[in-house]
Image (tube, rainbow, N blue to C red):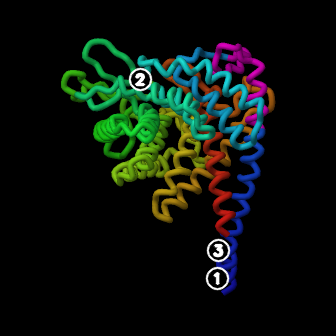
Amino acid sequence: MKKILLLLMFISALPTMAQEKNEELYITADQVLQRASQQYKYMMTLLSDDRFPKTYHSENDTFETSDSGWWCSGFYPGVLLYLNEDHPDDELKKEADRVMTLLSKEQFNKGTHDLGFMMYCSFGNAERLNPSEEYEEILMNSARSLASRFNETVGCIRSWDSRNDDFLVIIDNMMNLELLFWATEHSGDSTYYDIAVRHADVTMENHFRADNSSYHVLNYDVNTGKVREKKTAQGFADASAWARGQAWGLYGYTVMYRATGQQKYLDQAVKIADFILNHPDLPADKVPYWDFDAPDIPDALRDSSAGAIMASALLELKDYVKKRKAKKYAATAAEILVTLTTGEYIASPRTNGGFLLKHGVGHIPQNSEVDVPLTYGDYYLVEALLRYKSDRAKTQSDR
């Protein structure tokens, strides 16, 4: 009888324990966002006027930058805008405006599929926070440039340019479709919507394996639309599950459901989420190894950027599913954020080149950006923390 009473007391205490953990994470989230603002103000002192932050190499104290044409150029102003949204700061807003002026010329760049990352994470957020005709024109031109890479025969937007009859499409490209949905909503022209849907459908049909993991790169025959190769570029092997690729798919199909309301996209997002969350090699703290099939697990590097993307995606996906799954997705996102906001992953003040998040993994096969900070890691971590704070505020107001 005594054991039963103790068990009942423990069960009754669970909601309180969960509330306490949520409160702790909320406080931590605020502290980390404040640290992010401090870090980015420090980064501003290191950045040349015409450059964008790329990464930082601690072993030789090298701050690496890029021009505006690099696929990550939109994340820096995106982080600044998110931080200013959370806690208004004229210095951050002024810097975001400055670099977006540099970035604006990329609206006409038809040589990249990454205009969603580059222009929607920057000007998309700027338009959301402070609508203007200037932002709208830039976003529409960006959508036109992105749409120019769509091939009707293949049914996809070309990712990397290639020679001969190859037509390469990477899972990352799912992240650029949100810009097209905005363009249709803004202009009333369904062309952009139709391209996004077609790309997502063809990707869903061809990119995913029976276990709901994703290949990284597909090579289509541009003349017939048939798949020639299924392979990887940044993962461990062609048949492996590259962690950030799984995160891109999860986030991308969650956005597809939000934009279209079509059940098949929600089903796909859930399948990807369940592959990730039920994988036997997902660590207990939920920050994934850089590849789920890396040969040196459990000694393989973690990818903090993949964890941040997953957390942000799960915090949206939970709002679209039934209660049981919603609780699981919310709890997993919180676990990821708890891990990523520890000293193991969050940089000390005025270190890490001004980046917030440590231990990102870019391209191990090419030994590029390995165990370093990454701009997209920062962007999606800040986004996830803001989503967590927003959810908590809604919960508090509903009580």
SS label for mark 2: helix
| Dot label at residue 4 | 1
Magenta range? 35-63
How far, Cα to Cα, is label 2 from label 1?
Answer: 66 Å
Horizontal side, residue 367 vs residue 321: left or right = right
**Residue at coordinates 46% horizontally, 19% vertically from top-left?**
108
| Kind of residue at disc 3 | Ile
Look at mark 3 in the image and give the residue it sits on.
11
Among the two numbered marks 3 and 2 on one chain, the one whose residue lies closer to the N terminus: 3
Query: Quadrant of the image for the N terminus?
Result: bottom right
Mark 3 vs mark 2: in front? 2
Horizontally, residue 278 falls left or right of residue 52, namely left
Q: Is residue 203 visible?
A: no
SS category of the residue bearing label 3: helix
Q: Which residue is mark 2?
A: 145
* Residue contact between numbered discs 3 and 2, judged by CB atoms under 8 Å: no
Residue 201: % across, % down: 31, 41
**Element under disc 1:** helix
Vertical relation: 111 (above or below) 277: above
Q: Is residue 71 above or below residue 390?
A: above
Between discs 1 and 3, the one toward the N terminus: 1
User: x and y percent of residue 129 in the render?
Assistant: 62, 40
Sooner in the amino-acid sequence: mark 2 or mark 1: 1
Q: Amino acid at mark 1?
A: Ile
